Image: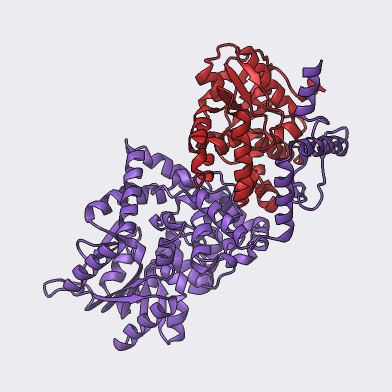
Chain colours: A red, B purple
Amino acid sequence: MRVGLFVTCLADLMRPSIGLAALKLLEQAGCEVVVPASQTCCGQPGYNSGDRAAAQALARKVIAEFEHCDYVVVPSGSCGGMIRTHYPELLADAPDLKERVAWLVNRTHELTDFLVNVMHLEQVPGRFDGTVTYHDSCAGLRELGVKSQPRALLSRVPGLALKEMQQPEQCCGFGGTFAVKYGEISSRIADQKCQDVESAGADALVLGDLGCMLSIEGRLRRRGDRKTRVLHVAEVLAGMSGEEIE
Amino acid sequence: MQVTSQQFKQAASRKLADHKLQTALMNARGRLVAARARSIQELDNFEEIRQAAADIRDHCLAYLDVYLEEWERNARAAGTIVHWAESHEEMNRLVLEIARRNQVRKVIKSKSMLGEESGLNEYLEEGGLEVRETDLGEYIIQQAGENPSHIIAPAVHKSKDEIADLFAEKHKRPRLTEIEALTHEAREILRPHFLDADMGITGANFLVAETGSTMIVTNEGNGRMTTTMPRVHVAVAGIEKCLPTLEDFSLLMRLLARSATGQSISNYLSFTTGPKRPADKDGPDEFHVIIVDIGRSRVLGSALREALRCIRCGACMNHCPVYQNIGGHAYGWVYPGPIGSVLTPAYVGIDKALDLPNAATLCNQCGVACPVKIPLPDLMRKLRERQVELRLRPGGERLGLKVWAWLATRPRLYALATRIAARLGRLAGGRERLIHWLPPGASQWTLGRDMPAPRGRTFRDIYAARRRA
């Protein structure tokens, strides 16, 4: 089974360990993983900023890069949601692409969803000694229905105990360019997420979207919390975090 | 009401720093969300009802002309005097004319968002009438000289202590501290006004075509008194409020109160079908309904049409992380929160509310709570697209997007640019791996947050090196 890994532009630039962890998980699950070298971004920043033409150009590029794969896997609910939920509307006025878009939509999965629902993964390589709390990212949860999948996988990590926060489904305030256009509001919303995380009292916050990670970790550190680790679910499942790969 | 949505950013900033407001918002936060969550559990097929409600609203909007004419025929047959108004000014003028013809001096009002839109109270007061808001929340903000900050809980931004101070000052009575006592005092003050008012003004939650009725959903009983006690009753309603049948109404009603306050049904549902008939004990001698367009038909023919499904429950704002933190006033017009971020630019002009559709995380907590499934984030995105088409975005942002799109479609250059950015970011992060300051364009990030620094190498470089090894 040929699986195309869509690394996402944020993970590529900010936290490559997420891509490496996703790669390891997919390979260990028995997939033949291809990583198209020309990939950049799914187009969401343009789409959500009202620049439809830029978003369309990038959507076409993604389709061309991944259509030789059996599946496309994305370690992000946000980028996965962009492809699955929004590409059909974004490319609606390009009838020549209709079938190719439909194909991509049906074959694209968020990483944990793919591991649970397509690969039926039973064992994960990672180990984590401590408690974690899980934040549901908005797009993963509300566009793709990613809720039980990461929890099911985390429950298979030896040593790990999940402690839910009060409102795991509440938005963290990131919102893409919202975080830089309305920084004050954005960081206030992030602050409430931090309070919820801290009340849960876990050793680490785990989540599936790097945008939320940057926002929540950034606010945690500014609040003076140096202790709560912030990890991507792929890193935990694969037993890799940023430090080890450098 | 005057539109101040262009000052959204500054207003939001003030609201975030307003301790009293933050306390009030913190107390309210989650209360309505939890109440709704509990009450929709009573329905075993909530999602099906929601879909049916959305379908009913779409059907009404598709055949609006047919149902409005049917409503008008039935309303006239029941003795209702029907007026049509295209603008806020026309609506205000019609109300004042009706008042003057009937020698009205005092008006009591039940809550009407349309009345807020058109500044009806001020207009009537300038015309020499005394106008009393009778909904408790509206009464409070009228006393305080403020605008509503929520469509169903207009005074939600005020704490009990603020209201206690306000009542003591305005009522010139000893300061009370218990909510029940405060409510009782407001009731005592309002009672004589109900008794000697000449005219009652209400909005309308729905117009029911098959019976020609207007109907209002209330909790305090003030609406019932406003529709029945004064000699003249005037209801104002937007054209989009029309429903074909009572059956449709009952389906929507299963969702409205639950979505709004978590009640299975509101305390009062008042239908008005014509004025007092000879055998009736009470009711007005004259019943006027003013049906207004004011931008609705324009929205009906636009890409934002789904916003007209709205049944004004307020769930979208209750569930909005932005609204939860800044309250309703910062939005700068009548409708705050996600629905306001769509309706305000749609009704007052896209260039008069540039921030609103952008000041949202697109988390869709609103969309999944909406009882009529309005795709609010999609509508906000359409407004963002329109702003770009009309070149209404700031130059820096346009340039930034251009550069990003240019690079992202040129993989080799993109790889080079990100390689450099990853290294610079690593350096900027220092030993802590945290960036405390970002340059203009991204500087707002670091107002209240650090930026976890990149690790020095991009995924693509690490991956390529591994493949070579």
x, y percent for residue B447: 76, 50
Residue B375 horizontal/vertical position (percent) = 46, 48
Instruction: Name the residue nearer the viewer: B469 or A160.
Output: B469
| Badge count | 0
Position of the C terminus of chain A, as image quadrant, is top right
User: Residue extending furthest front?
Assistant: A96
In this image, A149 relative to A186: left or right?
left
B352 or A35: nearer the eye?
Answer: A35
Which residue corresponds to the image point at 64% horizontal and 41% vertical from the top-left?
A58
Q: Residue A126's spot in the image, x, y percent?
A: 67, 15
Q: Is residue B31 left or right of residue A72?
A: left
Q: Position of residue B273 (x, y in %)?
A: 21, 67
Task: Answer left or right for B266 relative to A94.
Answer: left
Residue B333 appears in the picture as rendered: yes
Residue A95 placement, left or right of A128: left
Decide: is B337 above or below B362: below
The answer to whether one can see residue B216 in this image is no
Image quadrant assignment for residue A164: top right
In the foreground, B46 or B33: B46
Tell me the quadrant of the picture where the N terminus of chain A can be found. Answer: top right
Say which residue appears at 56% left-offset and 46% top-offset: B362
